[in-house]
Image (tube, grey):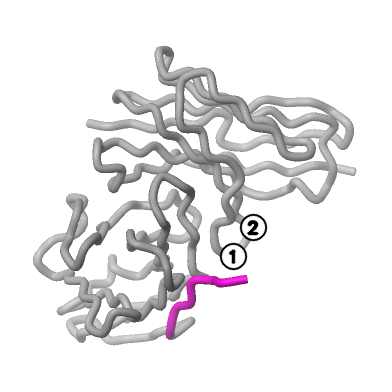
Amino acid sequence: ELKVEQNPLFLSMQEGKNYTIYCNYSTTSDRLYWYRQDPGKSLESLFVLLSNGAVKQEGRLMASLDTKARLSTLHITAAVHDLSATYFCAVDITYTGNQFYFGTGTSLTVIP
Amino acid sequence: EPEVTQTPSHQVTQMGQEVILRCVPISNHLYFYWYRQILGQKVEFLVSFYNNEISEKSEIFDDQFSVERPDGSNFTLKIRSTKLEDSAMYFCASRVAWETQYFGPGTRLLVL
């Protein structure tokens, strides 16, 4: 059974601190996506990682992909309150690129 | 900026009734998806659609579910005989190719 696991599930951190969210998956894939979801809202795309070693950065967030380890990370630098949300990784598991499995989600709360 | 739209935003139905959820994907997108998210849980893949046919479907997408793209713009999800456990937020998404998916705002379905 395919598993896409994130840890931690819940993260409370102070403003200004750094932290990393991990996304592990159990099948071969070299396409991974990160999304943000605010409470009661839809999903907003953050990063698209399409190859081993891919690294993308936007503002205080940086995502990377290690396909050999089946691991992606989302690193938060100097957190601010506006980053409070739930973050999901999603793995594309078919050659056609048309079947996605989402991780369990990480609920991030940044405390002023 | 183009966006995915969904109607209705909320739907309440009685168990055993049929519901149709509607989506208008972004006009030049080629791949279309339906997901569901039970309150507080992860996003679950239901089905993908490409070139006017189902591309992939998950175990959740049983005979009670069907999808159509009746007129080249709308993309619908039909649940033939709703169950209590179908209560969830349903998201439609679309994309061009290997890029990220763009999600609609969702339809909150409540089955009584």
> Magenta stretch: residue A62 in it?
no
Q: Indicate the quadrant where residue B80 lies.
A: bottom left
Q: Residue B9: percent from the left, percent from the top?
A: 48, 81
Please name whichever residue, B4 or B1, is drawn nearer the observer in this view of the structure: B1
Using residue B89 as the reference point, say whether residue A1 is left or right of it.
left
Tell me the crowding category of disc 1: few under 14, some 14 to 19, or many 20 or more residues within 10 angstroms, Cα based. few
Residue holding disc 2: A38
Where is residue B18 shown, x and y percent of the image?
20, 84
Identify whether B65 is placed above or below A48. below
Residue closer to the observer: A4 or B33: B33
Regarding mark 1 in the picture, which secondary structure is present there?
loop
Q: Check the image and report above or below for A23 versus B97.
A: above
| Residue segment shown in magenta | B1-7
- Identify residue for label 1: A41
* Residue under the image location 28 percent in, 77 percent down: B76
Q: Is residue A14 above or below residue B18?
A: above
For residue B51, side relative to residue A25 (left or right):
left
Identify residue type, mark 2.
Asp
Residue shown at 41%/45% (left/top)? Answer: B98
Element type where label 2 sits in the image: loop
Q: Residue at x 42, y 62 (%)?
A: B93
